[in-house]
């Protein structure tokens, strides 16, 4: 018996130790890992097929960039939905609604089913004026995209505006100017701009009185101000890590109401003192806007009628959660040209066709460093190059600022060169933004 125990005990310890080493997580997280794989798979497969037009191979390749096991996901597409499982475990599904994109199914779908797609206005003629034609700048952008993909960075779209004109754009095979691609966290910047537009229309004061939500009225969260949500300095406890069981993954793939996760988060730091990047904060901004505008349908109508359509963003889809509220932190699909239009609005100091579209001074407020001690180089859901002890992107001009998203999505604004650069792609790991954008700016300078 003693001899048997001496053999069995090491084997048991080995069985307990090997899975965490192989999977990068403890055994008790395996259930969360499988449900994360299928939830992520259902969401990205649905949007990838019905919005971006991807085939199964492209979808599985993209999913596998997060974890190799995702390549084993079973994707069962219907007319307007997909069902996903992993070896038959943790089935998840997502449904596509025309004009609304895809939503992961969580029980009763009545609220999201009730949403009416916003009316689409007639797209304008070709925009901007200088469109097409092979130039030295076009050659520079094509060379930059080719160089990215020679390094395995999977850049899918690269576009440059200068002084409000499209001077060059290049696309990887299978993508074009109409391709609607996931911006991930660039949706955060769109949410901030929507709040700026609400302020311009008198629907929101510049500094709303607290508490921001009734649920915060009786505790220290009543001190949190809107600007602190915008600048990610709310002090709320949050786990942004994209791992099984985290706040962010629960919010995006398992919660009926995306903002409810952060709404329940307790205060951890004094508001305004500590920066912490939180996708939950961006969905709190969406929740705040919904309450001000009068509900999910009113929010959706506002986004399209007062922001996207005036800007000419006709290849953009905002996806709601299961309760009909836009998932502002992460789920916006748009063409490279539409992302560029949003960047140009910021570069033009909030003016559209010469008239104020955002409040006077709003862009200056949005691109000012925040008040935190640990990371001031972040504005209103915008990343800043300057404002800290060192430049965030040392290869770029000091005044540069950007919308950024997972997998290397970027809309870069360079005010002194009157440039907007859009990069969309699917880099597994960190996209070397400073080096790559620095090289592109040098190519463009030499092309003149």
Image (spheres, rainbow, N blue to C red):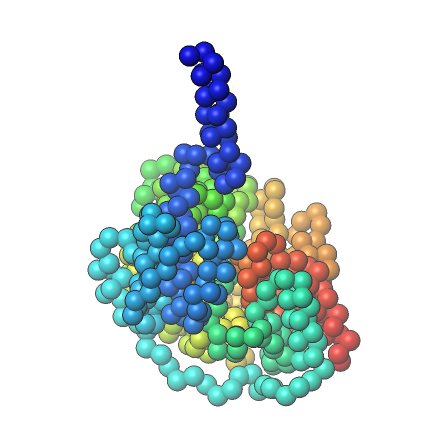
The image shows residue 244 at horizontal and vertical percentages of 44, 43
Question: Which residue corresponds to the image point at 65% horizontal and 71% vertical from the top-left?
Answer: 145
Apparent side of residue 402 relative to residue 280 in the rendered image (left or right): right
Q: Nearer the viewer, residue 271 or 4?
A: 4
Quadrant location, the N terminus: top left
Residue 265's place in the image compared with 326, above or below, is: above
- How many marks overall? 0
Question: Which residue corresponds to the image point at 44% horizontal and 75% vertical from the top-left?
Answer: 315
Apparent side of residue 154 relative to residue 98 in the rendered image (left or right): right
Question: Which residue corresponds to the image point at 53% horizontal and 67% vertical from the top-left?
Answer: 360
Q: Nearer the viewer, residue 273 or 244?
A: 244
Apparent side of residue 305 relative to residue 278 in the rendered image (left or right): left
Q: Nearer the viewer, residue 4 or 394?
A: 4
Q: Is residue 68 at all visible to an observer of this figure?
A: yes
User: Quarter-wise, where is residue 398 in the image?
Assistant: bottom right
Quadrant location, the C terminus: bottom right
Question: Which residue corresponds to the image point at 33% horizontal and 65% vertical from the top-left?
Answer: 77
The image shows residue 432 at horizontal and vertical percentages of 66, 58
The image shows residue 45 at horizontal and vertical percentages of 40, 62
Q: Is residue 225 at all visible to an observer of this figure?
A: no
The image shows residue 174 at horizontal and vertical percentages of 52, 75
Apparent side of residue 335 relative to residue 130 in the rendered image (left or right): left
Residue lying at the far right of the rendered structure: 446
User: Quarter-wise, where is residue 428 in the image?
Assistant: bottom right
User: Quarter-wise, where is residue 30 in the image?
Assistant: top left
Residue lying at the far top of the rendered structure: 2
């Amino acid at each position: 018996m003693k001899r048997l125990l001496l053999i069995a005990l090491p084997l048991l310890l080995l069985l307990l130790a090997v899975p965490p080493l192989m999977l990068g997580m403890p055994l008790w997280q395996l259930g969360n890992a499988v449900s994360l794989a299928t939830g992520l798979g259902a969401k990205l497969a649905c949007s990838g097929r019905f919005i971006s037009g991807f085939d199964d191979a492209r979808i599985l390749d993209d999913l596998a960039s997060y974890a190799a096991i995702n390549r084993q996901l079973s994707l069962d597409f219907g007319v307007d939905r997909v069902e996903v499982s992993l070896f038959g475990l943790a089935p998840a599904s997502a449904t596509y609604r025309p004009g609304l994109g895809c939503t992961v199914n969580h029980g009763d779908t009545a609220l999201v089913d009730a949403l009416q797609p916003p009316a689409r206005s007639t797209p304008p003629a070709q925009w901007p004026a200088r469109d097409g034609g092979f130039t030295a700048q076009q050659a520079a952008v094509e060379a930059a995209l080719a160089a990215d993909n020679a390094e395995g960075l999977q850049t899918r779209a690269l576009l440059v505006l200068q002084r409000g004109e499209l001077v060059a754009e290049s696309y990887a095979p299978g993508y074009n100017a109409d391709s609607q691609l996931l911006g991930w966290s660039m949706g955060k910047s769109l949410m901030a701009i929507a709040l700026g537009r609400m302020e311009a229309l008198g629907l929101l004061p510049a500094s709303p009185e607290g508490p921001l939500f009734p649920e915060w009225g009786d505790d220290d969260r009543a001190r949190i101000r809107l600007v602190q949500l915008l600048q990610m300095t709310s002090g709320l406890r949050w786990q942004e890590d994209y791992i099984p069981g985290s706040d962010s993954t629960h919010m995006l793939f398992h919660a009926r109401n995306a903002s409810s996760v952060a709404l329940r988060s307790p205060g951890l730091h004094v508001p305004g003192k500590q920066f912490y990047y939180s996708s939950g904060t961006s969905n709190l901004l969406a929740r705040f806007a919904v309450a001000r505008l009068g509900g999910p349908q009113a929010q959706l109508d506002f986004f399209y009628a007062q922001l996207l359509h005036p800007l000419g963003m006709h290849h953009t889809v905002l996806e709601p959660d299961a309760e009909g509220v836009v998932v502002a932190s992460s789920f916006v699909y748009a063409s490279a040209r539409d992302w560029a239009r949003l960047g140009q609005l910021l570069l033009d100091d909030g003016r559209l066709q010469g008239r104020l579209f955002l409040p006077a001074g709003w862009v200056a407020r949005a691109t000012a460093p925040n008040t935190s001690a640990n990371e001031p180089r972040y504005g209103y859901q915008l990343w800043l190059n300057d404002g800290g002890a060192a430049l965030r992107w040392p290869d770029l001009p000091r005044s540069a600022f950007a919308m950024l998203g997972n997998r290397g999505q970027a809309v870069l604004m360079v005010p002194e060169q009157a440039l907007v650069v859009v990069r969309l792609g699917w880099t597994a790991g960190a996209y070397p933004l400073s080096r790559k954008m620095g090289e592109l700016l040098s190519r463009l300078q030499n092309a003149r």
